[in-house]
Amino acid sequence: MTLQPPYSANHAPYAVDSRLSRGRLFPEPDSPTRTHYQRDRDRIIHSTAFRRLAHKTQVFVPHEGDHYRTRLTHTIEVGQIARAIARSLRLDEDLAEALALAHDLGHTPFGHTGEDALEEVMEPFGGFDHNAQALRIVTRLEKRYADYDGLNLAWETLEGLVKHNGPLLHRSGAPIEKYAARGLPVAILEFDARLPLDLSSYASAEAQAAAIADDVAYNAHDIDDGLRAGLFTIDDLRSVDFVGDLVREIQARHPGLERNRFVHELGRRLITRFVEDAIREGGARLAQANPQSAAAVRAQDRAMVTFSEPMQAADKAIKGFLYPHMYRHPKVMKVRVEAAEVVRRIARAFLADPALMPGEWASAAQAMKGEETRMARLICDYIAGMTDRYALAEHKRLFGDAPTLR
């Protein structure tokens, strides 16, 4: 029996075709049983960085409760939603899933709180960007293979990882607004010089499906977690466009429904409506543009896979509600302030004396003596890779105590 990778005959013309991949930085023989993107998905799942997501904060630190999302459970939910969207639009499901599973690999301990703190400390050395950090992880920091550093992912996976939220450069070559002041992160520029990622174009439709899946998952599980934590009530949600309609819909159909089931039903309906909208809008845009290749999708002047205008407004309303009621809730902010200080103190201690880092990290820093920026980036790599509990343990090792984050 001759083994053959399971290519799908159902892919649309605009889907990425694994057989036409631009390849890998380090050439490898094709697998006889898996497509390029199935291999990439598997490499991501088996990576150390992926496992660490289990102990990294989404919004709540893990000891707040067993049922709150961690960065890993969020990632798994994004992967499921990305596959559902990709399947309906006849895209490569494996590439969409691989990108969904990799999109948060660069996050620090304590969620966006840790990222903000690390950005503050790293500001003199080029700052911190979790997307660029994810690229560093999959191209340099994972050390699993005998022949190269990183995971040696396919070009299309790396492109989607870097550009899933859209182009990083305008067609003129100038950085987009997010990077206008400082310029693109060095990690992205350095890798792009080795393997150009077409930074002024959109990524594939598969990458766009993974990006929109992230928004869907965020909206649904942050409402779910916020309700479970008692940060706001179901009645509070009645004033939120779209969500309020779902609340009233459930109350009319299931009067007296117990609260736990109500919360689940709300999350289920919210995900369903957002996903179905993204599929309808994405299908309509693709039909209108009629791209006949993945390259034609990249050449478009707007995203192909996105929400309709009414659902974009609903997404904005949800985020507008969650920001004050959840992300800036006094209970959450208390923990955020303490967690940020943990990251800042650790980073400043290592920047002052890199020898305080353990073993191989201290040795690597010693080899960079006199190269301040490179050494700072090494320290940043070490801290960004920490889990919440490891960061607290390092704080205790360095300073004799650690906050309880409650």
Image: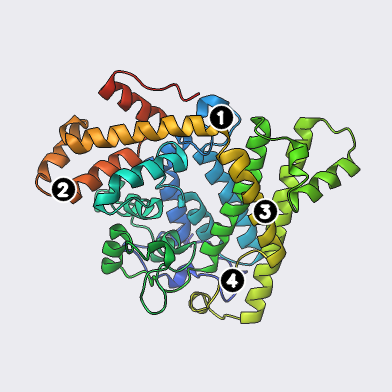
User: Decide: marks 4, 2 in contact (CB < 8 A)?
Assistant: no
What secondary structure is found at the residue carrying circle 2?
Answer: helix
73 vs 316, nearest the viewer: 316
Real-space Cα distance between discs 4 and 2?
Answer: 43 Å
What secondary structure is found at the residue carrying circle 4?
Answer: loop
What secondary structure is found at the residue carrying circle 1?
Answer: helix
Q: From what the image shows, is residue 143 above or below residue 288?
A: above
Q: Please name which of the two marks, 2 or 3, marks the residue nearer to the observer.
A: 3
User: Decide: marks 2, 3 in contact (CB < 8 A)?
Assistant: no
Where residue 85 appears, as percent x and y from the top left, is: 63, 60
Q: From what the image shows, is residue 306 above or below residue 69?
A: below
Where residue 291 appears, as percent x and y from the top left, is: 57, 80
96 vs 147, nearest the viewer: 96
Mark sitting earlier along the chain (1/3): 3
- The amino acid type of the residue labelled 4 equals Met
| Other-residue count near label 1 (Cα within 10 Å), few / some / many at <14 / 14–19 / ≥20 | some
Real-space Cα distance between discs 1 and 4?
Answer: 39 Å
- The residue beneath circle 2 is 372
The residue shown at (50%, 40%) is 71
The residue shown at (68%, 66%) is 309
Mark sitting earlier along the chain (4/3): 4
Can you tell which quarter of the image residue 24 is in? bottom left
- The residue beneath circle 1 is 331
Q: How many marks?
A: 4
User: Decide: marks 1, 4 in contact (CB < 8 A)?
Assistant: no
- The answer to whether residue 84 is left or right of residue 167 is right
| Other-residue count near label 4 (Cα within 10 Å), few / some / many at <14 / 14–19 / ≥20 | many
- The amino acid type of the residue labelled 3 equals Ala
Real-space Cα distance between discs 4 and 3?
Answer: 22 Å
- The residue beneath circle 4 is 304
- The answer to whether residue 356 is left or right of residue 49 is left
- The residue beneath circle 3 is 317
